[in-house]
Image (cartoon, coloured by chain):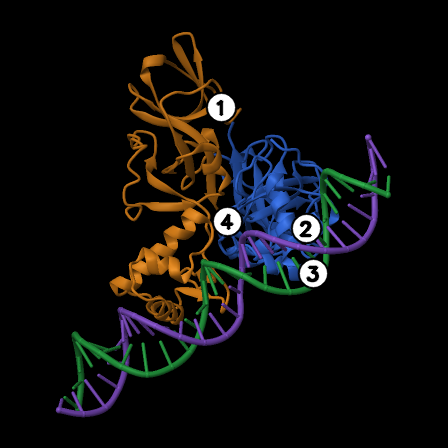
Chain colours: A blue, B orange, C green, D purple
Amino acid sequence: MTTRKRLPPRRQQILDFIQTFIAENGIPPTVRDVQRACEISSTSVVDYNLKVLKRDGYLNRRPDTARGIELLDETGQPVSNAPRVQIIGAIAAGQPIPVFSTEGAASSEEFDTIEVPPELPRRHGKLFGLTVNGTSMIDALIDDGDVVIVKPGMEAVNGEMVVAWLRDEEEATLKKFYLEGDQVRLQPANSQMNPIYSSADNVEVRGKVVTVIRKFA
Amino acid sequence: MTTRKRLPPRRQQILDFIQTFIAENGIPPTVRDVQRACEISSTSVVDYNLKVLKRDGYLNRRPDTARGIELLDETGQPVSNAPRVQIIGAIAAGQPIPVFSTEGAASSEEFDTIEVPPELPRRHGKLFGLTVNGTSMIDALIDDGDVVIVKPGMEAVNGEMVVAWLRDEEEATLKKFYLEGDQVRLQPANSQMNPIYSSADNVEVRGKVVTVIRKFA
DNA sequence: TTGGCGTCAGAACACAAGTTCGGAGGATGC
DNA sequence: GCATCCTCCGAACTTGTGTTCTGACGCCAA
């Protein structure tokens, strides 16, 4: 396995561009796409750098075929274009819930991410992930270590599973949300457990749970 | 929205080929790729059919760019190349577990499928899905309607979550598997529940659970 | 200095590939 | 028959695109 260290700026720039191009267009760029984007004066320079990147295991090239660049990950596997969701924090009883900054995508380098089926962002837009610490969400059928995928938002429709913060109890929780008059019923996903009732202004909804991802060994 | 009815054989053939080509190669085919594969005598015929397919909403074409075909789904969204796993049956207590035919991919038309992150097939190979009926798997933190993704196989290593069939009890279940001497301990994922002990030859392992997929409204 | 090495520039080559055009059957309806 | 539409064919045109060649510049060590 070739080493994967810091690259010369030109090469890093090329690699970054290829990545974003694929993310934006779904197909790899041509040599001349790279040339224009990186303001390189000749295609031969691009070709040269692509050859080096291929030698060092960053990508594959299908010879003589248009858009024949194929990005590889650290293990040499073809990289997928599946969307990744940022894991912006943890959720546990007694721990505050991170605020979702709907705007600033920030530098995606700072956060862990998790691969999700493309269907999710297509249907729900911008999403965030939260890791679950401890077994306090077990009544929502969510285990320690699970990742919940959340669509940020303050409102909830009755019956939706939400990320809620109980002010008085200082507790984060995942429950189905039912507004009943001026109080809120928070119903566990586990039918064997009993609901919690709380006054409406004690409940802060932070987002809706879209799905949960659990990894087994 | 244009209607999406049965297509003339030529057009269907072209559409099918584009689909499989993308699945196999990760990039869309060229017009001449289509021509060769479908044994069409002229690129103009391909172009003509692609134009019609575009008009009818089956795909997009980036003009003047190589491999500019982009498949669309029923809603007009670009189709993802995320892998799909077949849901070959259901799992519930008291219901036999379908046998996974590791070979015959069969005609993928017959089964429901579910989109999964590409990472899963990359790491585990061929996978199957089972829908969970009823709440009998609740001690495994799996709800009614969840889909468990299973890697088929008869063996299990201690600690793995498996799809098991208990012969005497005539019960299907999802549990962590521990072989202890000549008996098997089946440990629920829910730490508040107690394990089941059974003789080793009463337990039929059908596969390992790789992940669980739960959809919220 | 000299030579090797990595990198880049400019140009050209050769083929790949999207597009267009004129024409031709075949089905359908008037 | 005649017109019209859908589909196909063969060929050509134009541009896209991977590849290669020659030369040059800077860096570093012998």
Same-chain status of marks 1 and 2: no
The picture places residue D16, in percent across and down from the top left corner, at 53, 65
Residue shown at the point (47%, 37%) measured from the top left = B122
Residue sitting at 60 percent across and 40 percent down?
A55
Q: Earlier in the sequence, mark 2 or mark 3?
A: 3
Q: Which amino acid does label 3 sit on?
A: Ser
Q: Quadrant of residue B16?
A: bottom left
Q: Nearer the viewer, mark 4 or mark 2?
A: 4
Q: Mark 3 points at which residue?
A: A41
Amino acid marked by disc 1: Met
Label drawn at residue A63: 4
Subunit of label 3:
A
Residue at the disc numbered 2? A100
Residue with the mark numbered 1: B193
Q: Badge 4: how crowded within 10 Å, few (<14), some, or many (20+)?
A: few
Tell me where residue B159 appears, x and y as whole percent: 49, 20
Does the CB distance between marks 4 and 1 fall below 8 Å?
no
Which badge, 4 or 2, is on the more N-terminal residue? Answer: 4
Alpha-carbon distance for marks 4 and 1?
58 Å
Residue A194 seen from this side: no
The answer to whether A13 appears left or right of D2 in the picture is right
Helix, strand or loop under label 3: loop
Single out the mark in the foreground, 3 or 1: 3
Q: Nearer the viewer, mark 4 or mark 1?
A: 4
